[in-house]
Amino acid sequence: MCTVVILRRPEHDWPLLIAANRDEMLERPSLAPARHWPDRPEVVAGQDKLSGGSWLGVNDHGVVAAILNRTGSLGPLAEKRSRGELILEALDHADARDAAEALGDIDPNAYRTFNLVIADNRDAFWIAARHGARRVSVEEIPVGLSIFTSADRNDLTKPRVEAYLPLFEAATAPDPETDDWSQWIPLMGDRTGATRDEPMCIVSDYGYGTVSSSLIAVPQPKPGATPRWQFADGRPDITTYEPIALTGTTVTGK
């Protein structure tokens, strides 16, 4: 399963902080976040080379979108559309609320089950496509800390959430102004903090594990305000986070 940690604090200079680990089959090819889509020049996202879609991205308006598989739905199916295309569809919008409203009308049975997080400096939403549901559910993500894995938001029946939610709540929040994520980075790379084989950073002997990690911050709207993205192109316990260029991404007008 992948993990997305989101901290919302509307009155802060940096109202949206996101940390995300991508867990995937190690042989599945991908490209680090960049402007990979000529028909979507405003989108910076990682590219899944198998499907052409993405797992996480930011657009030039400061909208962030991340997708996670729900339990029992790892990998593609020939008769289903790729969930990675939903990231690109979400990032076609200049506002998280507009994106959530648009994607709230999709047919969940066209895809394998998923959790989709869409957020900007003002709003944040969670879209869930559950097994057998006729419609996706759309919920606003509350202010404060949330963790998404393969189940519902902050679902304490998931060992990873049970173990890491209190650790993130106790940690000092990152300071994007100085690129200080010092208390979140060890948590994203932790391999020991959860029981029943659900650490934050997965290493296995069956070709599956944590393949990359991201730290994203979105600022309040003001002239020249630009989101920040630090990306580890590999396991975050052994890979250094490096900045992703977001030139042209300016958060204004919200």
Image (cartoon, grey):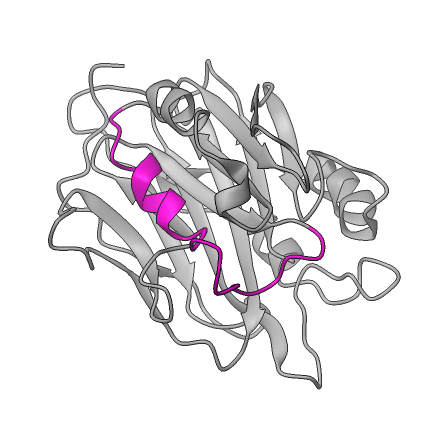
How many numbered discs, if any? Answer: 0
Q: Is residue 250 left or right of residue 136?
A: left
Q: Quadrant of the C terminus?
A: top left
Residue 156's x, y, as percent?
83, 39
Say if 148 sits above or below 252 in the image. Answer: below
* Residue 248 painted magenta: no
* Residue 90 painted magenta: yes
Q: Is residue 159 left or right of residue 34?
A: right
Q: What residue occupies the far front of the structure in this picture?
A: 79
User: Residue sitting at 24 percent across and 35 percent down?
Assistant: 92
Looking at this view, is 98 or 34 the one in front?
98
Residue 83 visible? The answer is yes
Residue 218, by quadrant, is top left
User: Residue sitting at 62 percent across and 83 percent down?
Assistant: 207
Say if 15 sits above or below 117 in the image. Answer: above
Residue 181 visible? The answer is no
User: Residue sitting at 53 percent across and 25 percent down?
Assistant: 8
Q: Quadrant of the N terminus?
A: bottom right
Say if 45 sits above or below 25 in the image. Answer: above
Q: Is residue 64 left or right of residue 152?
A: left
Q: Please state the extent of the stretch shown in magenta in the rendering.
A: 71-94
Q: What secondary structure characterizes most of the magenta part?
A: loop
Looking at this view, is 49 or 33 the one in front?
49
Residue 147's x, y, as percent?
66, 39
Residue 186's x, y, as percent?
63, 58
Residue 4, by quadrant, is top right
Residue 32, by quadrant, is bottom left
Residue 148's x, y, as percent?
64, 41
Say if 140 sits above or below 107 in the image. Answer: above
Looking at this view, is 173 or 64 the one in front?
64
